[in-house]
Amino acid sequence: MRRALSFAVVVLSLGGCGADAPTYASCEDDLDCSDPNDACYRLLFDRNDGSRGEGNLCSRGCVEDLDCPLDAVCTSLAGDPSMTRFCALVCTVADDCYADFACTSVEGMDLSLCLP
């Protein structure tokens, strides 16, 4: 099931060399992501509270929630002209997310996602 978030975003895949980041953690480029199915997505968006979110996320493309590992949803973010779908980790508190990520409420849905 595709879910759209109510904030603007640009999602781009990056390339380069790197480390060993798990799915849903921060990255600098695709090779930072430890799972070969993941890519490093660049996210730029406005949160519902008016603050700006920006950062990189190891994730993977998806068609439905079942394509996503762990407790995650398949989503595309409003404002992304390509409507790129990717997996985002569901959370209830900040401690559910990796460092440098916030548990961000999603307008129009009864859930929050770990986002930069």
Image (cartoon, grey):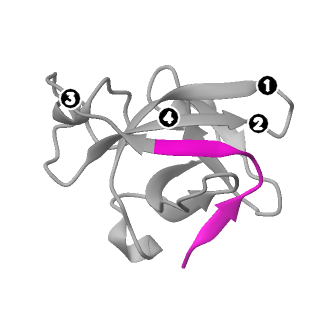
Q: CA distance from mark 4 to mark 3?
A: 18 Å
Figure quadrant of the N terminus: bottom right
Circle number at residue 51: 1
Circle number at residue 32: 3
Q: Estimate how packed mark 4 is, as few (under 14), some (14 to 19) or many (20 or more) residues with alpha carbons within 10 Å.
A: many
Q: Estimate how packed mark 2 is, as few (under 14), some (14 to 19) or many (20 or more) residues with alpha carbons within 10 Å.
A: many
- State the SS at label 4: loop
> What residue type is disc 3 on?
Asp
Circle number at residue 47: 2
Q: Which residue is mark 4?
A: 97
Q: Which residues are magenta?
A: 1-11
Circle 1/circle 2 CB separation < 8 Å: yes
Which is nearer the N-term, disc 1 or disc 3? 3
> What residue type is disc 1 on?
Ser
Where 4 sits versus 97, above or below? below
Q: Residue furthest right?
A: 49
Figure quadrant of the C terminus: top right
Lateral position of residue 48 relative to residue 90, left or right: right
